């Protein structure tokens, strides 16, 4: 049944905007919701007891805009759940969606979601969210595979990948559906409340519509004085909160009889959450590492045989197996490479006494017998990248992997330099891969510094597309080698720019990247020490 009234007759959507001490951005969020047009009946702005003038700003906006209602909480709730629940209780339209005060709805978002909801009679309609890095403006789509084309899902169990999109803000909900099932956010201070709310939504088995339209812009401000929960991961309590939310989501789906979705939640934890935090583990101090390691082992011990029934050589599963096998933190640089995207399994390539591939001589019980059988497009291939700024020569070494690489027959590598903040800005060159005496494959190519500097200063990421004898390809990143003369900044004379500054560095995932600047002005800024952003 269609919620009443019809979207064609009246505003059908309430947009709930929540915020706390965000006077710098909340007006933009509210205006982006009001700017959606007549489909929005009201914007319910819930101020979570701000002290920076946000409430007064919202009241002034409301005085000139009859569709804006302001609700103030008398005491700060400490989280996002309570203000969202307050807005949901106040919503008067047949559909509702949520918006955070530091984000925006792109033009046409509500119309796209509402049209799909109305045409398909879906209780939940989702669209594409993009993470926009500020101030650069670089955009990264969130779970793009889910929103590649329009789709209707009769029930979430028919598409388990839905559990990977844990956001609540890129979706339109039938208000009566949420209320009939008592679906609410966790109240108070509950980090990662979206995970729990979304699990409750999927547990209620709604009809789901998916649209490829951009419907939400998630602003990522890494330099903000107060980081968002998703960015502030320096304390181990953040990890404990995340595992608690994942555990709660799993229990909700299991209690609802959705065993497949519950298992998908744990698979998502291994492939997304665990890999993200492992990549950052080498950056933490010893106390954090030990606390993180012990907590993660206890969390993974809750997994049963069915949760571990997937490919034991899949990166997330392999990370879990190493963690469970070792009581103490170990092999952190190698684990970081395995957790990278794309995954890299760096040497050593050990074998047990009977010749079975294994993680290492110290952990022979973590076997890798299925690894060589994987198709080349799924192999965690390891390529080392050596770059000496003085010579501008990039040397690549593709490692053998228990015979799988040799059987595939490497032919060449397409070397790609991709600008991090300017989509579509790419330099490519193909170089042959030649067998080396030690069983590896090597290649060398100059780094086109002049061309990179001419196209755009800033960060350039290195990606490689390996081609094999049968035409199969595998896109990989390259492990940045360190050592004397490597990863050192250098100023190089340039006939076009006067001076090019290049700083090779390893990303959090261990891959090689460059920061490039050109001209005497950048040189002066670097020499006076004001280019902290150049540091990795």
Image (cartoon, rainbow, N blue to C red):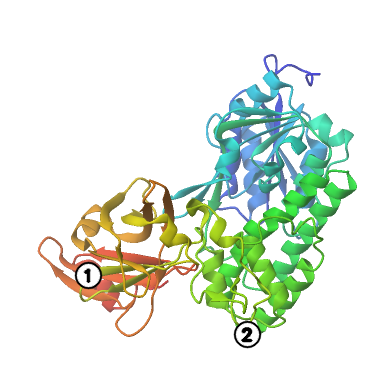
Residue appearing at x 32%, y 48% in the figure: 425
Q: Nearer the viewer, residue 199 or 430?
A: 430
Q: Which residue is mark 1?
A: 392
Q: Quadrant of residue 479?
A: bottom left
Q: Number of labelled discs? A: 2
Image quarter hosting the C terminus: bottom left
Marks 2 and 1 in Cβ contact (< 8 Å): no
Mark 1 burial class by Cα count in 10 Å: few <14, some 14-19, many 20+: some
Left or right of 51, for residue 467:
left
Q: Is residue 12 above or below residue 511?
A: above
Left or right of 148, for residue 526:
left
**Image coordinates for residue 144, horizontal then vertical, percent:** 55, 42
Viewer can see residue 229: no
Q: Is residue 344 above or below residue 284?
A: above
Is label 2 in a helix, a strand or a loop?
helix
**Image coordinates for residue 34, horizontal then vertical, percent:** 60, 32
Residue appearing at x 69%, y 69% in the figure: 321
Tell me, for residue 19, which label it has, or none.
none
Q: Is residue 100 above or below residue 206?
A: below
Distance between mark 2 and mark 1 Cα atoms: 36 Å
Left or right of 357, for residue 255:
right
Task: Looking at the image, tell me whether mark 2 or mark 1 is earlier in sequence order.
Answer: 2
- Pick out the residue farthest to the left: 495
**Image coordinates for residue 453, horizontal then vertical, percent:** 23, 59
Residue appearing at x 12%, y 60% in the figure: 496
Is label 1 in a helix, a strand or a loop?
loop
**Image coordinates for residue 130, horizontal then vertical, percent:** 53, 44
Image quarter hosting the N terminus: top right
Task: Please identify, in this view, whether the residue under mark 2 or under mark 1 is nearer the observer.
Answer: 1
Q: Which residue is mark 2?
A: 286
Q: Nearer the viewer, residue 50 or 108?
A: 108
Q: Nearer the viewer, residue 103 or 147?
A: 147
């Amino acid at each position: 049944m269609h919620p009443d009234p019809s979207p064609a007759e009246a505003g059908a959507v309430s947009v709930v905007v929540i915020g706390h001490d965000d006077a710098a951005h909340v007006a933009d969020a509210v205006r982006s919701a009001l700017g959606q047009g007549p489909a929005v009946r009201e914007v319910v702005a819930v101020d979570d007891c701000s002290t920076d003038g946000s409430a007064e700003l919202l009241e002034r906006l409301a005085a000139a805009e009859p569709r804006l209602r302001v609700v103030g909480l008398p005491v700060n709730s400490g989280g996002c759940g309570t203000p969202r629940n307050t807005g949901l209780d106040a919503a008067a339209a047949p559909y509702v969606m949520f918006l955070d005060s530091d984000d925006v709805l792109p033009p046409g978002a509500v119309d796209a979601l509402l049209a799909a909801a109305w045409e398909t009679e879906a209780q939940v309609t989702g669209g594409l969210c993009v993470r926009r890095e500020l101030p650069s403006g670089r955009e990264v789509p969130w779970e793009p595979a889910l929103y590649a084309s329009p789709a209707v899902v009769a029930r979430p169990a028919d598409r388990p990948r839905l559990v990977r999109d844990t956001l609540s803000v890129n979706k339109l909900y039938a208000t009566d559906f949420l209320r009939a099932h008592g679906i609410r956010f966790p109240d108070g201070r509950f980090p990662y409340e979206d995970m729990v709310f979304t699990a409750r939504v999927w547990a209620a088995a709604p009809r789901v519509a998916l649209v490829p339209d951009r419907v939400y812009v998630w602003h990522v401000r890494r330099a903000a004085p107060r980081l968002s929960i998703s960015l502030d991961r320096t304390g181990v309590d953040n990890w404990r909160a995340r595992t608690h939310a994942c555990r709660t989501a799993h229990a909700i789906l299991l209690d609802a009889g959705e065993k497949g979705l519950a298992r998908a939640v744990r698979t998502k934890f291994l492939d997304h959450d665990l890999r993200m935090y492992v990549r950052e583990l080498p950056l933490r101090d010893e106390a954090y590492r030990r606390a993180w390691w012990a907590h993660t082992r206890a969390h993974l011990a809750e997994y049963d045989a069915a949760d571990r029934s997937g490919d034991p050589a899949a990166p997330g599963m392999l990370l879990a197996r190493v963690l469970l096998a070792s009581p103490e933190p170990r092999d952190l640089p190698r684990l970081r490479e395995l957790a990278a995207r794309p995954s890299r399994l760096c040497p050593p390539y050990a074998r047990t006494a009977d010749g079975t591939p294994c993680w290492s001589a110290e952990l022979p019980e973590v076997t890798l017998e299925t690894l060589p059988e994987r198709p080349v497009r799924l192999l965690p291939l390891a390529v080392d990248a050596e770059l000496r700024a003085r010579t501008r020569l990039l040397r690549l070494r593709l490692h053998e992997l228990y015979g799988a690489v040799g059987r595939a027959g490497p032919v060449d590598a397409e070397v790609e330099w991709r600008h991090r903040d300017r989509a579509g800005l790419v330099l490519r060159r193909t170089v042959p891969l030649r067998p080396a005496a030690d069983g590896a494959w090597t290649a060398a190519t100059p780094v086109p510094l002049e061309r990179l500097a001419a196209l755009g200063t800033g960060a350039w990421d290195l990606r490689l597309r390996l081609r094999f004898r049968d035409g199969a390809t595998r896109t990989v990143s390259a492990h940045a080698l360190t050592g004397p003369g490597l990863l050192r900044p250098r100023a190089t004379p340039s006939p076009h720019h006067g001076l090019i500054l290049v700083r090779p560095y390893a990303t959090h995932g261990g891959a090689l990247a460059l920061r490039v600047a050109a001209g005497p002005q950048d040189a002066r800024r670097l020499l006076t020490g004001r280019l902290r952003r150049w540091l990795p």
